Image: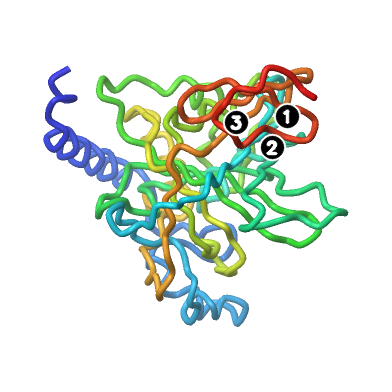
Amino acid sequence: MWLTWLPGIRMALQTALFLFIAAVVMLAGGVDCDAGPGWNHILGGTDWAGLSAANAICDNGQKQSPVAIEDSAAVPSSDPGALIITWNSALIDFQVQNLGVTVQVMINGSNTLTVPSYIYTPPANSTGLTLAQFHFHTPSEYTLDGEYFPAEVHFVHKDPVTGQLAVIGVFFSLSPDDSDNPELGTFFPNITEDAGTNSEAIRQSLNLNSLLPASRSYYHLSGSLTTPPCSENVLWFVMKNPLDISSSQLMKLQFALAHGEGSRVNNRPVQPLNGRTIILFQGNVQSCDSSSLLPNQCYNAQGTTFVCCPGGCPSSPTSVPACA
């Protein structure tokens, strides 16, 4: 309990525990394993551009990710800027993959992201930004006020017509009592330690909305993939507040990496902003359960319940009692 009164001490203890876990994993894993994709994080990405001409932008790009986020320097938005996340929480078909360079969960089904129209509007013939997969980095790739978090998850959405990517990033902090994150516990047991191996196809309940923080302020900027080929066609939405993860769950991720590319870390160092502006949207995320019958329910950062009509969720903070 006292850790909640002394956040500075808590952060120091979390950092020390994270470094201890990383050291244990490094000793347990090999150091000369090749990553499946032909690249790895061992040199922090400094060698990526030299591996292929297609990766040249990794070195000379102007909108590379990740970046260092400074809360005081972020520009508060005067626009509601609501993200509408429509993810299924019923039975989902998914597969857990150890790619050597990351642990990735492939998702089937209709799981979509709608962003403010002035940021991106899908063409009329598109199904919009659809969740393809989510994967993990340890430690975090983005930093917040100079601090790395023990882990970060990226939810990757893609417009199948334009190829536009939109990624939601969520930080993880070590839980104060070292308790497991229950939602991670639904699929972490399926993580294999051998690179290039996948779990069996799984069909079970997975509440993706539980992998978003309750308080949903977020930072937005335009950027790139954080792995080769570092393409600069990514809309980034990084949640300000972290979720919890236990030390054993963190170690599970790091062991999978150590047996893959030989390094217990898979984060790219922060890249220059190059004049980009980071925009802060305060509490403007609505999550909808696409598995339930209409009207679906949406929730904003304050816990207000909305009715999600066929045309989408309302952007007003006032509850809507029924669909028109």
Q: Nearer the viewer, residue 306 or 124?
A: 306
Relative side of 171 to 196, left or right:
left
* Measured Cα–Cα span from mark 3 to mark 1: 20 Å
Question: Residue 170 vs residue 105: left or right?
Answer: left
Residue drawn where x is 25% and y is 24% of the image: 176
The mark that comes first in sequence, 2 or 1, is 1
Residue under the point 39% across and 68% down? 271
Figure quadrant of the N terminus: top left
Q: Nearer the viewer, mark 3 or mark 2?
A: 3
Q: Amino acid at mark 1?
A: Asp
Q: Nearer the viewer, mark 3 or mark 1?
A: 3
Near-viewer residue (313 or 7): 313
Q: Quadrant of residue 239?
A: top left
Check disc 3 and report its element: helix, strand or loop. strand
Asked if residue 93 is positioned above or below residue 182 in the image, the reply reads: below
Q: Amino acid at mark 2?
A: Ile
Q: Residues within 10 Å of mark 1 (few under 14, many from 20)?
A: some
Residue 171, horizontal then vertical, whole percent: 40, 41
* Circle 1: element type: strand
- Separation of disc 3 and disc 2 at Cα? 17 Å
Type of amino acid under label 3: Ser
The residue indicated by pointer 3 is: 287
| Residue, disc 1 | 93
Q: Tag on residue 35?
A: none
**In this image, 13 relative to 184: left or right?**
left
Q: Residue at x 40, y 54 (%)?
A: 141
> Residue tagged by mark 2?
107
Tag 2 secondary structure: strand
